[in-house]
Image (tube, coloured by chain):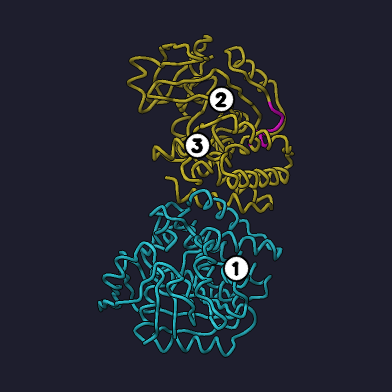
Chain colours: A yellow, B cyan
Amino acid sequence: MKIAIVGAGAIGTFYGVKLAQAGHAVHFLLRSDYEIVRERGFEVHDCGTLSRVAVNAHRTPESIGVCDLVFIALKTTANARYSALIAPLVGPETLVLTVQNGLGNVEKLCELFGGSRVLGGICYATINRTAPGVVKTNGRTLLWLAEPEGGPQERTRALAELFSSAGLAAEVQDSLTAMLWKKLCWNVPFNGLCIAGGNIDCAQLMASPELVELAWALMRELQAAARALGVEISDAHLQKQVDVTVKCGAYLPSSLLDFRAARPVEVESIWGEPLRAARRAGVSAPHLETLYWLLKKLCV
Amino acid sequence: MKIAIVGAGAIGTFYGVKLAQAGHAVHFLLRSDYEIVRERGFEVHDCGTLSRVAVNAHRTPESIGVCDLVFIALKTTANARYSALIAPLVGPETLVLTVQNGLGNVEKLCELFGGSRVLGGICYATINRTAPGVVKTNGRTLLWLAEPEGGPQERTRALAELFSSAGLAAEVQDSLTAMLWKKLCWNVPFNGLCIAGGNIDCAQLMASPELVELAWALMRELQAAARALGVEISDAHLQKQVDVTVKCGAYLPSSLLDFRAARPVEVESIWGEPLRAARRAGVSAPHLETLYWLLKKLCV
């Protein structure tokens, strides 16, 4: 299968490398890392095992051309470039899969390329890009896949099988909305409060009773908004987000890394879109509103 | 009249000096500035005019003894020391006036010294302590005075006259609750958001549409809580807080100065007590709650 990776950060790099190692024709669209990757390939540290992987590196989507699958792991702050980056990769049979953070990505892609071409994904993984062309992971990943509308189809299951057979665990989900809001239950409070709570890691966050209480208030608002959208998120799921974060230790969420490096933070997709979705559904989310307004000021 | 000044920061120093210049026997209770003030007196820059004022400087309240008036301008973070600092100054006829920020001060003083001795005040002034023993002001001050319970009495008016005749404009107010909540309409949003909005001055705050919107949401919650407590705060008063802040330019609120200097910030009296008062009155204040929880983590 001919696959394009758009956005070769931690997730894009690791998934692309694994797909290439499984025999697919994977093409990476690169910007700042182009020279180094073309020269040296990617360096992947997976559970302590180092692999150097030569890949097809490109500077422009035109040099890649039409693909069977476009895997989008761009930061959502670059979504204004969707059309320029992706259109040259899309033909009549192309599937476009976004695994980007937050809300609004699938909708924009459907507008640009038609709902029949687009799929949504959520990636649970601990992968860090530690230098240009270098990623490190503990190897544990899980990809959730869902159709823009309705339940899984044959193509959803086929795509899950494609990833699974490349060693990348994948599961089909019944509802895109449920899938995205469940992930927001982690990203909204924990990415957000590590920034607004004073540029702190997850261990420092969890050591503050006030911030833990605020995390709960934020999760409750997401739960209420999701319910208004027809999605039930269980209390057990909320508790799990807290438990997982305790286990994270001094983990630095990706938004915090962006904040510390003075890179753009995905404020609109992670906080702005959910807030607007809650309002449209008639749900008041004042804690989220406060956090969003503060992050708009705090972040680039 | 024999007057003790407890808390000789900007407000305490300026008010004490003016009262001394008007002929009262003013005694300052000092800690870190004791040596320099005893040696050189205070240096007051009032509208560009420099005065050096020798004063009665004390290290302990016992060396001052019982006074007619105790003027409390301590930071509320030192309120645990009320009893030790103030009891030696209080006799059967003593009036205890607090001009401290936020809520809870009058109540604590009433508990300690009885409601018949205590008065509440709010000070509107632009005075900065620029160095030990040195304060600068544009000379414009206004002191509001109110009884702990009920409307003004003869003693309230007499105290206003005392300040006015020393060149310190003073007005009696009908309601302590109204007086304090009106002042909170500035302190809660603007002191708070200059810290939580990323350590910024008032001009930077007002340049952010999101933070201005958040300031309005906070003021609306205070307005609702005050209403539940029987106090009507007009929309015009809220608008005035915004207008005043625009005129402030790059002003640094006192809480921000404390934050920048890593000194304790008055988080409980300015944000915690109003939040708890709103809850007790059955008013939900989620924007204030979020700001309070963040400030608890951000501030010493």
Labels 2 and 3 positioned on one and the same chain: yes
Which mark sits nearer the N-terminus, 2 or 3?
Answer: 2
Question: Does the magenta run of residues contain A175?
Answer: yes
Pointer 3 residue: A201
State the residue position of label 2.
A125
Real-space Cα separation, disc 1 to disc 2, in angstroms: 52 Å
Other-residue count near label 2 (Cα within 10 Å), few / some / many at <14 / 14–19 / ≥20: some
- Residue A114 or residue B91, whichever sits in front: B91
Residue B135, horizontal then vertical, whole percent: 32, 70
The residue sitting at 31% across, 69% down in the picture is B37
What percent of the width, then of the height, locates residue A4?
A: 48, 21
Between circles 1 and 2, the one closer to the viewer is 1
Front residue of A235 and A213: A213
Q: Is residue A233 left or right of residue B240?
A: right
Question: Helix, strand or loop at disc 2?
Answer: strand
Residue drawn at x 44%, y 76% as measured from the top left: B4
Instruction: Give the residue displayed 48% in from the left and 31% down from the top.
Output: A74
Q: Position of residue A79 (x, y in %)?
A: 48, 37
Which is more foreground, mark 3 or mark 1? 1
Q: CA distance from mark 3 to mark 1?
A: 38 Å
Q: Secondary structure at mark 1?
A: helix
At label 1, counting other C-alpha atoms closer than 10 Å, the crowd grade (few under 14, some 14-19, many 20 or more) is: some
Position of B248 relative to A147 (above/below): below
Looking at the figure, which quarter contains the C terminus of chain A?
top left
Residue under label 1? B108
Camera-nearest residue between A77 and B49: B49
Residue B30 placed where, x, y %?
39, 67
Q: Amino acid at mark 2?
A: Ala
Chain holding disc 1: B
- Subunit of label 2: A
